[in-house]
Amino acid sequence: MNLNERRIFVCNCETTMKMDADNLYKALKKSHDVKGDAPFINSHLCRSQLKNFEAALEKGEPLLVACTQEASLFEEIADEKNSDVQFINIREMAGWSNDKASSTPKMAALLSDATKNVKPARLKTLHSDGLCVVYGKGQTAYDAAKHLNNHLSVTLILEDADDITLDAEQSFPIYRGAIEGCTGHFGDFKLSLKNHAALNPSSRGSLEFGDAKSSFKTECSLILDLSNGAPLLSGHKHRDGYKRIDAGSQAEIFKAILELQELVGEFEKPIYVQYNETICAHSRSKKIGCSKCLDHCPAGAITSNGDGVLVDANICGGCGTCHAICPTGAMDYTYPTRHDTVSRIQNLVKTFSNAGGKTPVLLIHDEQHGNPLISAMARFGKGLPAHVIPFHLHAPTSFGHVEMAASLAAGFHHVHILGNPEYQEEYEGLNQEIELMGALLDGLNLDDTSRISLHFEQDPDALESILYQMPEKSAVQTASFDPIGTKREVGRTALSLIAEASSDKPDFIPLPQGSPYGKISVNDDACTLCMACVSSCPSNALMDNPDQPQLRFVESACVQCGLCKTTCPEGAISLSAQYNLLPDSMQPKTLYEEEPFCCISCGTPFASRSVVERIKSQLGDKHWMYLGDHRTQLIEMCNDCRIETQANAEDNPMAHGERPRVRTTQDYIDAEDSGLSIDDFIIKDS
């Protein structure tokens, strides 16, 4: 059986899974263009039936093997043939389950998802020369440095040199000092030290050090931090090449040593985020608007850069929080892209439902925490329910309200997000997205936040209990759409589909403060139509009218960044977070308009009346340029008339005298004949 040009290999793992070839074939056939016959169900593909896999390699076809446990064995054989082989785990994710419902629909969905082509993220190359700094205290730090030095070029920096017994042969430098600053990234860390002193080679008994330097700077590629103090780097859990380990945990130290000693050479790292500065709402003219990405980036990879921000791809750990909470879509996750994520979700629910699956539920999880937890449930418990479809993401924190809305619109009844407890403090941004989605659902009278759940379970039995005891809900909607366009366009499309399912939907849904949807209000008594807000708006939600003094607003484009409010010199603007369900939310509306003021000289309208009157009240007869009625009238003129009037005025400070007479050759001859100087002659002749 071939699906999306890839031959499928399935195995019931020595009959520990219930698999029916015909049913699986029919399930996939209902949603996809499947070629060939029903798949052969292997029972021992990784051992006695390995010849079946080898025979397929000879044909040179791209393969999908529904087994991850023996992936290394299959890859080793495939490498010899230079073959394209991918893997998907349907055993722990679907087959090993005590649920009485058939697992065939979920298997079909997982196989279909595994064959979808997704756009890969761009890569960048990082280089590590193996220079490693070990920082800590006593014998523990010394022993760790000694073991690492077998593979790396190690420098040991000791906070405390007591209770250390040195070997007779010392193969790496030892210093005493404190690291007071650390910047950079894997392959290029920069350290600032104080009280830095080298070990005296003649030390006998206790260690003795030379003269200390008050400040010292050095560089390295890797850091093993055993100091038990504050982390040297923000977001240290996401920093490649930096290991901060409890000095009292020998097992963790040993694990860190094994990992660090492999980090020498060139490494490719995904560029997780693509940044579009043209739609960023961070700042305008040094006035701060949105700072969500800066506030929530756990690794400190995002910094302010004038009116925009700067994303350091060397530091970024790919949590995707900036992508989830960015109101404009300026931060766009590429691992995978939004388009691929939504398309895969739609494909999962479509394949599952067409194959006869009921009440599909989506489980978002990562590899580090989610895969082992799901595996433990399958091996020692009931396994996942047949209707719970796991969906692996590099970081669940990248799953924002747009993806949540698209999941519910596609037909999922519920979305569970399995968070990693190790990074629980980093889920504030995702919690805000869940709160936003809950407010939208509640406003549509469809349900509250119970449709979107975030769990930090470490106990597989506890997660199993949650999934099996979850009350059934009807689907909000079952509709697919092509997720093209900007973040806001995809989000509004998904929310519009969800809103269609509401029989009692309001015109407006109130949202939590800070939500990326809403309106602005203008105080008519304060606004002078100076249009400062228009020039500061990053999303073109505010606009002027070139033909008359008028401030217009497109609510669907407003991201509630607050730049208009911050910029307004009159304090005339206020924000209100809401979601407008009316069709005219995408049409310009007039917030405030005035009668135009016409030039007193030529009659051309050139400004609003309130602006002219305000300037007259502030400058007329008060500023030296506008003393007297004739000068005050300049304020009431258009630019052309104002310049012309100033140029013709007797007291024009820029005025010049008459043009001097042009001196000719004859003038010089006549002056010489008359015995006068040329200047006297010109005066006399004039």
Image (cartoon, rainbow, N blue to C red):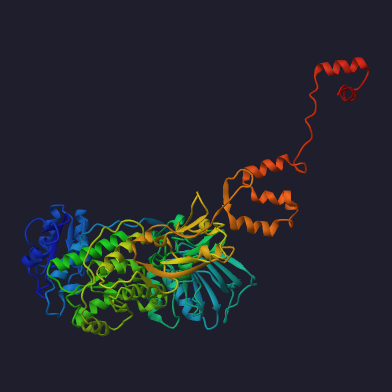
Q: Is residue 80 left or right of residue 167?
A: left
Quarter of the figure with the N terminus: bottom left
Callout count: 0
Left or right position of 137 against 667: left
Horizontal and vertical percent position of residue 365: 29, 72
| 334 relative position to 4: left or right | right
- Determine whether 357 is above or below 634 in the image: below
565 and 277: which is toward the camera? 565
Residue toward you, 110 or 84:
110
Looking at the image, the residue that sits furthest to the right is 675
Determine the image quadrant of residue 81: bottom left
Image coords of residue 253 (percent x, y) = 41, 77
Question: In the image, is 229 to the left or to the right of 53?
Answer: right
Of the 4 image quadrants, the one containing the C terminus is: top right
Position of residue 435 measured from the top left corner of the image (x, y, whole percent): 37, 75
Q: Nearer the viewer, residue 362 or 138?
A: 362
Whether residue 121 is visible: yes
Please indicate, yes or no, whether residue 87 appears anywhere in the rendered image. no
* Location of residue 200 by image quarter: bottom right
Q: Who's the residue at 20% across and 69% down the image?
A: 89
Quick check: 521 above or below 158? above
Where is residue 25? Give x, y as percent: 9, 63
What residue do we see at 12% from left, 67% from top?
355
